[in-house]
Image: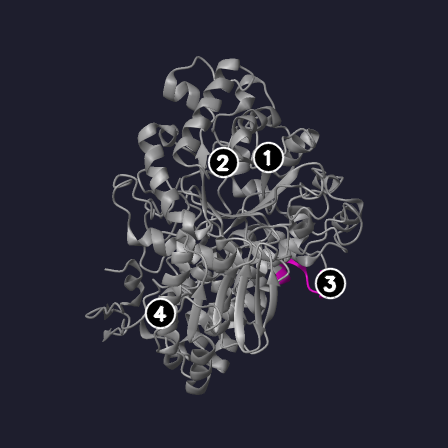
Amino acid sequence: MNRFCYWCVAIIFSGFIQQANASIADFKGEDGYRLWLKYDLLSDVSLRKNYAKQLGSIYIDTQTDTGKVIMQELQLALPGLLGQEPRFTDSAQQATLVISLNPSLQADATDEAFAIQTQQGKIQILAQNPVGLLYGTFHLLRLVQTEQSLAKLDIQQAPKIKLRMLNHWDDLDRHTERGFAGESIFDWHKLPDYKEQRYYDYARANASVGINGIVPINVNSNSLILTPAYLRKVQALADIFRPYGIKVYLSIKFSSPQQLDGLPTSDPLDPQVQQWWQAKAAEIYQLIPDFGGFLVKANSEGQPGPGDYGRTHDIGANMLAKALQPFGGNVLWRAFVYAHDSEHERSLQAYNEFVPLDGHFESNVSVQVKNGPIDFQPREPFSPLFGAMPQTSLAMEFQVTQEYLGFSTHLAYLGSMYKEVLDSDTHTNGEGSTVAKVIDGSLSKAPLTVMAGVANIGADRNWTGHIFGQANWYVLGRLAWDHDLSADNIAREWVAMTLTHDPKASEQIVAMMMQSRENIVNYMTPLGLHHLMDTGHHYGPGPWVDNLGRDDWNPTYYHRADDKGIGLDRTTDGTNAVSQYAPYWQEIFNDPKKTPDNLLLWFHHLPWDYTMASGKTLWVELVEHYYAGAAAVELMQAQWLGLKDKIEPNQFNQVRMALAIQVKEARWWRDACVLYFQGYSNMALPAGLEKPQHSLEYYQSLTFPYAPGQG
């Protein structure tokens, strides 16, 4: 059976009882497996006929494995979209679509660039190598899926970021840390011999948005991945992914020389250790000639690293980098570090450890920085590391999985968050020094540029647990390719390719998506509050938690609520975190009147009766944000229910059920947090707001021992 036929089969579920109203739920049609590559028949007959004429005869001039993938994709896509089988020809002269290598193409220095041109009624896709042709083919199919004109195409594209990656936090036993869509898609027990259909479809989806690197195992790594048996399993994945332009990278445990071969140390300055890594690199490249390199979490949350031997991060990273250099590999060294015994407030620690090392890293090292200075919170300011290390490649690490955003039952389109961070102006090199320009090398001319996302993918049929979670995978790839694209336009693409072409329905869905992340900020952590999630699993509110093993694991460490007020003072009179930002931001963040409301309590501890820009007190504004967030989810639910006739039943019902959960949990977050903070403010709820359903003690009593995705 052709491996791509799997996507063409509609899965029909029947007999599901909807307990809420005792009716039979309709789960016919698309279940989400095909993602944004649905390739359903276009409803506009005239448009379909026009496309069929323009794409009626196809010439592909490469016989590589990637060329075969291009042909297979067209064989799958065009009959589905147009109701007509493609006709392939050996003559470029006779073809209406020519997919051709052109070594002289000057679209960009990168060999991933492509051009699409319409000339004299013929469409040409041109690229320097087959992978560029694959990207161009997917772009052309996107134009068809979104019903764009092909009459006068003149497109030249090249990625702005060199390495565009997914980091899976998946363990070898298939548990997925911070994953909420089922177990890992990587079945290490069956590999290398059993190559599942899902691996190919995963590769297609990634290639369609330009993702060219994956890390299949957790940053909290297992040294077994570097043993010969597991490397052969990695080789099997690399062989599958190679035609799609995707390289495999591995998370490695820094103490592997000791764990695997009994060396007395893993000190990066020890010659035996250096030789061990050099030999291991050679072993890997013998199996996987295009292996990407290593991702490293070191001296963070108990993971071993160079600090165990009194060495700095650059010494550890450079030791690995030198082992990979003969083969063209790279090291991605995570900056998510915070010392157990540090006297400094948590948000300062990565900056303090890494900025003194600027310029000390090898050219094939990129320091991978989370978008904010804490840990994937619903809202954070951009990390001050961006712009503070001009002589070092800095990689962006975004959250795609929703560890702190309600898991896979909360609708949170993260494109707006990614753009908020990427468009932030660091002002470290004058106005216009955006985070995007830091990571794409525009400011530093760094040869290695990287954007990575912590994947939200699992073995659920719909891949991401929530249909709208697919949009976050999609937007990560699109923005890594071109960070100048708008989150709004990317959402429109995704809706058209995944859900509906109906104009009114599309407008309504895009509006829901663009507001969705702000809704979550409002009912979880408004006005710059952060890290209010409950212990360990990060599911649900826990602003009262104050009994964990270290201060900076406790929500009370971050909100500092007391009888006088709320918020963490990070000004020059407090922890002085503002000093890590450019003078432009220091002036703003030091002054509560200038600090944006959405970061106010991130930088300031303010009285409950502090007068906000609106003229309301801080207490009233805080409570109103909580209630507005919950109300917005109820509105979103009502809007979705009104779209029943515009969305396939299976997709519609999956989202309907998730929204019902989100409505309940938004109220839970609202009520629990408002009651807890009210105990300090001693102020009444603003007039007209409904009282919380339960007591604070009730919310504090809730436990969730089997919440998914725990570490």
Q: Are marks 1 and 2 in contact (CB under 8 Å)?
A: yes
Residue 117: quarter of image: bottom right
Q: Is residue 648 visible?
A: yes
Start-end of magenta stretch: 612-621
Left or right side of 636 for 77: left
Question: Disc number at residue 613?
Answer: 3
Q: Based on the displayed image, in which of its 4 quarters is residue 67 positioned?
A: bottom left
Q: Position of residue 257 (x, y in %)?
A: 43, 20
Residue 39 seen: no
Amino acid carrying label 2: it is Gly
Q: Which label lies toward us, 3 or 1?
A: 1
Q: CA distance from mark 2 to mark 4?
A: 38 Å
**Residue type indicated by callout 1:** Asn
First reached walking from the N terminus: tag 2 or tag 4:
2
Q: Amino acid at mark 3?
A: Ala
Gap in angstroms between the C-alphas marked 4 and 1: 43 Å
Disc number for residue 651 = 4
Distance from the alpha carbon under mark 3 to that under mark 1? 47 Å
In three-dimensional space, the C-alpha distance between marks 3 and 4, rounded to whole angstroms, equals 42 Å
Front-most of residues 638 and 555: 638
571 vs 197: above or below: above
Classify mark 2: residues with Cα within 10 Å, few (<14), some (14-19) or many (20+).
many
Instruction: Say what secondary structure mark 3 lies in.
Output: loop
Does the magenta run of residues contain 244? no
Mark toward the start of the polypeptide (3 vs 2): 2
Looking at the image, residue 4 lies above or below residue 437: below
Nearer the observer, 426 or 143: 143
How busy is the neighbourhood of tag 4: few (under 14 within 10 Å), some, or many (20 plus)?
many
The residues tagged by marks 3 and 2 sit, at their Cα atoms, a distance apart of 50 Å
Residue bearing mark 2: 293
What amino acid type is highlighted by mark number 4?
Gln
Q: Nearer the viewer, mark 4 or mark 1?
A: 1
